[in-house]
Image: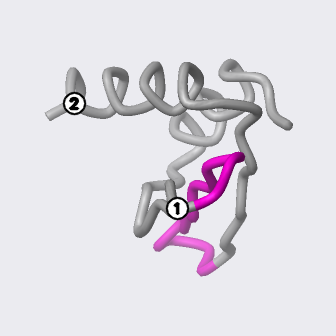
Amino acid sequence: MSDFNFIKNLYEDGYRCIYYDTSQNNPKIYLKNFDSEHSRVVELSDENQFSEFKNYIDELK
């Protein structure tokens, strides 16, 4: 499980979503920082957190 603010902080640090998997009960978001080449996998607790994440990145575009 992850806190949504944690994901927002990763985005502010330069991480970007490269893939997400919603096929399981706990959606996973795969993030990569293309400057440092580091990657992270964030497991969300439910679909509501995933929807909040999707709305956040859609607003960034």
Q: Are marks 1 and 2 in contact (CB under 8 Å)?
A: no
Q: Where residue 58 appears, x then y in whole percent? A: 21, 30
Image coordinates for residue 25, horizontal then vertical, percent: 68, 48
Task: Quadrant for the N terminus, please.
Answer: top right
Residue identifier under label 1:
23
Residue found 43% across the figure and 67% down from its top: 19
Query: Residue 40 or 43: which is nearer the viewer?
Result: 43
Residue 23, image x, y percentages? 52, 61
Q: Residue at x 41, y 68 (%)?
A: 18
Q: Amino acid at mark 2?
A: Asp
Magenta-span inclusion, residue 34: yes
* SS label for mark 1: loop
Q: Residue at x 23, y 28 (%)?
A: 60
Q: Which quadrant of the view contains residue 51?
A: top left
Determine crowd level at label 1: few under 14, some 14-19, many 20+ residues with C-alpha closer than 10 A. Answer: few
Query: Within the image, what quadrant is residue 57 found in?
Result: top left
Q: On residue 58, which mark appears?
A: 2
Position of residue 36 relative to residue 22, above or below, is below
Crowding at mark 2 (Cα within 10 Å: few <14, some 14-19, many 20+): few
Q: In the rendered structure, which disc, 1 or 2, sits on the residue that comes first in sequence? A: 1
- What range of the chain is rendered magenta? 24-37
